[in-house]
Image (tube, coloured by chain):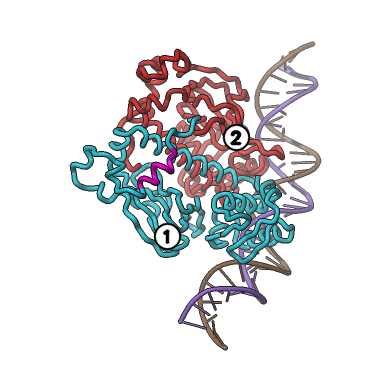
Chain colours: A cyan, B red, C brown, D purple
DNA sequence: CGTGTAGTTGAGATGCGTCAATAGTTGTGG
DNA sequence: CCACAACTATTGACGCATCTCAACTACACG
């Protein structure tokens, strides 16, 4: 829908984080059964590489990251892995319709996440149309992200993919001209549909071309932001 | 969200199609300005290859196909085109958040579509939570489709891509063992991130492998549905 | 200091793209 | 019904970008 939601989604979820869910999710028929609600907004901790949920398991909650980085991915029968998305602090993941999750989610670094139960969401949205609007907006945001990812994967060179990835990471989590890459090369490769070797070679080439400088394997300095942007678009 | 909507989305939209929008979209503050509503549910005709809306133009409506086939795509600066999705009869397209469309939409065949104006949707959803639920469900469906497309484009062989595409088309519009392909080879290529030559070669190879038989360029008979499914997954 | 993991680099193989020619299809007009 | 043009699809030959396999390097951690 054309207009941005009247109340910023992040604002509403910030409230989710700060206050007990009852404050946000008002009384509703769901509350009477005495279950479900108490668990909304539950804080969970995960170690690096720990699984948060598995592909095909019950979709009872969605999650917001308080700190850390999460990847959602699918494993194919031949063992190949494809990463659907990376989620940074403040992002929401596992936001799917259907009774089962359609990807698995894994902590890339140590993570603190908040789990919000789906149970009762329909009732809450009925009671508060602004909340319903936030949910719609969140779904639309995920849609845009997935479309951009599909665009990134279709018929682009390795250099274009890697440049676009770096530009995206810079936009999302950039500290000035530095980009921190919390994920391993293999994660980047599985996200971009490349091999780890091609990712590594492409990064080296970008460095030789004076577009970036590799401070360390996980830390990139952008020396030519304009060119990086141009290469990735 | 785990459960399917209590009222099937299609049902609600069937009502959209059959009845004047006032019957579905009840009185609301928006109506008082005397505009917008009268145009909701407007029926439009498009010739083959005609543009329905352009990338970047005002996002005032979303659309449902009554008959025909539509593609949404993006054009890159170097002239390459990427197709985001194909929409068949009954599908909804142009369902995006934001003030501008982020793709262009073109009729592949002669088309009849219904345009629904966004204007006033927020108010309507506030008034009718079931409608809000349908909108959310539609967004979630688009999200799933885009995720599947990204999965299809990442590190799969040409044979896997084409097989998956055929299996998808069979599931969506199949008449028994026959698949009608309303789009040109170039469209399929731009959807799968391949060239037209590779698509053509791959189809020929599938025919030599006795997975399909090409009745004509636009009509495929599936001779080994199980194998086709397996190749594409 | 040794061991294990992550990342880089090199050499060769290959799948797909590119360019070009051919074949098939559709539509128009005589 | 045929002739012709224009377009779409198929097929072939060749080149190149990326994959594969392998060796090497850098870094973290006990």
- In the rendering, at what x and y percent does residue B118 appear? 47, 25
Residue carrying label 2: B73
Dot 2 surroundings within 10 Å: few (below 14), some, or many (20 or more)?
many
Q: Give the number of marks.
A: 2
Question: Magenta includes A54?
Answer: no
Distance between mark 1 and mark 2 Cα atoms: 37 Å
Give the residue displayed 33% in from the left and 37% down from the top: B4
Can you tell which quarter of the image residue B6 is in?
A: top left
- In the rendering, at what x and y percent does residue B233 appear? 48, 49
- Asked whether residue A166 appears in the rendered view, the answer is yes
Q: What are the residue bounds of the magenta stretch? A: A8-16
Left/right placement of residue D14 relative to residue A21 reads right
- In the rendering, at what x and y percent does residue A5 appear? 45, 34
Q: Main secondary structure of the magenta part?
A: helix
- In the rendering, at what x and y percent does residue D4 appear? 80, 21
Residue carrying label 1: A111
Give the residue displayed 58% in from the left and 49% down from the top: A171
Left/right placement of residue B205 relative to residue B169 reads right
């Amino acid at each position: 829908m054309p207009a941005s939601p009247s109340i910023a989604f992040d604002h509403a979820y910030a409230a989710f984080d700060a206050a007990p869910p009852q404050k946000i999710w008002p009384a509703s028929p769901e509350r009477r059964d005495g279950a479900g609600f108490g668990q909304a907004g539950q804080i969970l901790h995960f170690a690096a590489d720990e699984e948060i949920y598995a592909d095909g398991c019950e979709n009872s909650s969605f999650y917001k990251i308080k700190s850390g980085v999460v990847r959602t991915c699918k494993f194919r029968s031949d063992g190949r892995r494809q990463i659907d998305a990376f989620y940074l602090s403040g992002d929401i993941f596992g936001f799917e319709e259907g009774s089962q999750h359609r990807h698995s989610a894994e902590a890339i670094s140590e993570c603190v996440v908040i789990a919000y139960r789906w149970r009762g969401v329909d009732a809450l949205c009925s009671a508060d149309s602004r909340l319903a609007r936030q949910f719609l907006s969140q779904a639309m945001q995920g849609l845009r992200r997935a479309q951009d990812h599909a665009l990134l994967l279709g018929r682009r060179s390795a250099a274009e993919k890697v440049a676009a990835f770096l530009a995206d990471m810079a936009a999302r989590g950039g500290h000035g001209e530095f980009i921190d890459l919390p994920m391993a090369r293999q994660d980047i490769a599985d996200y971009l549909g490349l091999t780890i070797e091609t990712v590594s070679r492409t990064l080296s080439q970008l460095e030789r071309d004076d577009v970036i400088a590799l401070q360390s394997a996980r830390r990139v300095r952008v020396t030519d932001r304009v060119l990086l942007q141009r290469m990735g678009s």
